Image (cartoon, coloured by chain):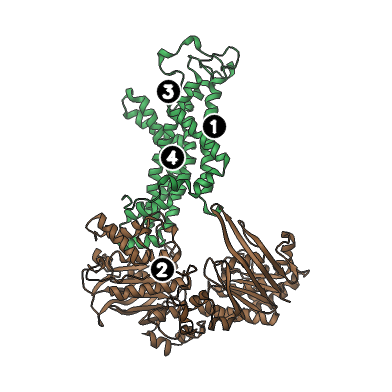
Amino acid sequence: MRNSVFAPPVTRWQRIRQSDLMLSFLESPVTVIAAVGALLMIFAALGAGVIAFHDPYDMASIDIFDSNLPPAWVEGGDARYPLGTDAVGRGIFSTILYGSRMSIFIGVTSVALSLVIGVTAGLIAGYRGGFMDAVIMRIAEVQLALPTILVALLISGILRAIAPPSTMDKVAILVLILSIGLSNWVQFARAVRASTMVERSQEYVLAARLIGIGPLTIMFRHILPNVMGPIMVIATLNLSGAILTEATLSFLGVGVPPTQPSLGTLINGGTDYLFSGSWWITIFPGAALALLVLTVNLVGDWLRDALNPTLG
Amino acid sequence: MSLLDLRNLRIDFDTRRGTVEAVRGIDLSIARGEIVGIVGESGAGKSTIGNAVIGLLEPPGRIAGGEVWFDGQRIDTLSEAAMRRIRGRRIGMIFQDPMTSLNPLLTIGDQIAETICQHSDTSRAEALRQAVALLAEVGIPNPEQRMNEYPHQFSGGMRQRVVITLALCANPDLVICDEPTTALDVSVQAQILSLLRRLCRERNVGAIFITHDMGVISEVTDRVAVMHHGLIVETGDTQTVLAHPRHAYSQSLLSAVPRADARLARFPQLDYREDGAPPEERQVIDLSTHWLGRRGKAVQGGDQTLLEARNLTMRFVSHRSIIPAWRRDFTAVDDLSFDIKRGETFGLVGESGSGKSTVARMIAGLYTPSVGQVVYDGQVIGGTDAQPMAAKVRQQIQMIFQDPFSSLNRRMRVGDIVAEPILHHGLAASRSEAQSVVADLLDHVGLGADAAHKYPHAFSGGQRQRISIARALATRPQFLICDEPTSALDVSIQAQILNLLKDLQAELGLTLLFISHDLPVIRQMCDRVGVMKSGKLVELAAAEDIFEAPKHPYTTELLSLMPRVTAPDASEWAAVKG
């Protein structure tokens, strides 16, 4: 892709400040709160090493005598562990920070993977039409018939068979990214294909063809920027879905190994203690997951409405 | 007493970026049985008035001041419930698009009968009987049978007749017609206009006729109000206003209407500007030194043929099937042959669906003809057995499209849009040269070099069309296809764009293929004209012969249906020039 030959006379920030999107964002208090909440959680997760009271996965920093402590405000709680500790003495607050870092990482990379696959497939199917379109869309339909968990088990089985045992921890994360990414590209492909079919017959595309510009340049330089709106909406909504799927798969044992924190493994690890009275081990990671998914979804919903011209 | 009285009416639109005053205080009255036209260019506020009268002003629009009096009653302050009793029953409305103003899931008879029952205590059987009579009155053949058909079984003109029936079935006192014939072909337009005029006379109904088309105004209205930027600048008897416009804006508007009776060298430049600034002077290109002059081959005059269409035929598949006997196709262009000489303007004229745009796209190489060939400068460039077009030939043929809003990529800066062909074909030695060429081209089409930094949404329709022209020129073309380049534009803008095309043609020795449905525009622009009907070329002759001595009956019919504006004598108001 070529960059603009023409430098903008107003700064990018000024343009963003005055855009309709920004104005509509500021008009919706729920969205502003959700966006601030989501950003806070994401930054807290990224800065886990600084914010957390201790590194729960560093053996030297945990003490088995601190195990199963209730949250700080409950009788018997300890101020060092605001949300209590788990069976081996790891602070729940710290594990949530480290856990959501992993969850968000897997969510973002898997959505990026499905976005790249889906957008490319959708552009080619929509612009080329005919045989290519039929082949790509049939593959997409086959993909839709396979549940994510099946794909995950399949990929996990293959990778575990070919990868050396010492790299299993890394493989587990790769399995998650690949299986979630490969399961969700169809949505992107369908949306991009539909918009591309509309854009293909627009006169600016005809003008580009008249200049003699090749199909790949037309697809990626001319059509892609014009179909990005719906893609961003799907990406945001899929991010929360991917985080949930990660949690599900980890809960079921296909995903992140118990030695590494993710929101799914934390919830999974805590369920054993739920009825023995240590409710905080599983409730707080569960609440963190719900809050993260809810705020990201609210932002995605607003984006969908704001970018839909028919809703004004 | 007048039927409708607008007193100092003001309408505001509150937007995120401040208040837009759409209508800034107008006075207008309409008597029973009188047809009053409101004419003006887009954005003048004419449709807003119609919507405000009938109480259908969409938020954020609101009546900011003034009064609307209808038959002795003030109606702008009425509640929605009270307004609903007036709307449809006493004031009818006819919209522009007959395709969307009917419910596609109800039969025509049901829609009319429902409307009649809604507005009076008629039984359904009686309403259906009335509907038949009304359909017969608006000139729909076999009304009993067609009552049971659905809107998609009606043609555009027939649908508009049904919409008129719907507006008239409750016996209203006033009808508001908002561009009722703009979406229709001239032949259908003439029928609808005479129908509306006859119905208003017979039923003694007052009508507001909103349009941008001076020809339509002169055909149907008794009085006319000329609107400009939310103000009525002139009102009066239609024939008087058209023949002797007093206000500078009305004069400039009328002078921009293409004349059908004689060809002028240029459209008179009587640009009305509120601030009184004179129109800026254009720099004339000297081809020997200018970038645009560095073309491969010098342009020669004479009778040399530049482009030849040989037996062009285009079939589109309308029904796909594995079984060959079940396949159906539709012939859009049928065995069309013509040639275009170097340096001339060749016109193709015809109604919608006649296949003119398909011809343009075949010549441009966007469609491959099913049968036949396109020969450019002795080389076969289009046809089933043609070689892919070489970049050198590709560069020489460019096109200007109809829709100024979809022909520019809204995510690219104007400068990048115009620079793209230059950089793609390597027509500039460096990026800085490309930038200066772009600035020069934009300046030359009358936009100014600063336009390069903006995005297309910052420009109006006419300015966007200038950007399209600059982009087309950026490949240094010899042959320019103009597919309805001004049909989406206001008349005054149309005159400017057509003048620009004429100037560029003269300076650069361009050959033009000019496609339009508008006969007066064709007359002003073209040297030779081909008349198309249902994919066939029915007549091909010099423009003057087509207009003065048409041979084919279809050409004669088209010419007779063309709405004519009584040509005003421009010399009379020469004093306002400049």
Between marks 3 and 4, how big is the CA–CA gap? 35 Å
Left/right placement of residue B388 relative to residue A241 reads left
Q: Which mark is first along the chain, 1 or 3?
A: 3
Q: Quadrant of residue A158?
A: top left
Percent x, y for residue B410? 42, 56
Q: Is residue B45 visible in the rendered structure shown here? A: yes
Which mark is drawn over residue A50?
Answer: 3
Left/right placement of residue B435 relative to residue A102 reads left
Q: Which residue is mark 2?
A: B316
Q: Dot 1, how many residues are within 10 Å of its Cα: few (below 14), some (14-19), or many (20+)? A: some
Q: Quadrant of residue A207?
A: bottom left
Between marks 3 and 1, how big is the CA–CA gap? 22 Å
Above or below, comparing residue B103 to residue B240 in the picture: above
**On what subunit does the disc labeled 1 rest?**
A
State yes or no: discs 1 and 2 in contact (Cβ < 8 Å): no
Q: Given the image, on which type of amino acid does mark 3 rest?
A: Val
Most foreground residue, B245 or A190 = B245
Left/right placement of residue A186 relative to residue A164 reads right
State yes or no: discs 3 and 1 in contact (Cβ < 8 Å): no
Q: Dot 3, how many residues are within 10 Å of its Cα: few (below 14), some (14-19), or many (20+)? A: few
State yes or no: discs 3 and 4 in contact (Cβ < 8 Å): no
The chain that appears green in the image is A
Above or below, comparing residue A12 to residue A57 in the picture: below
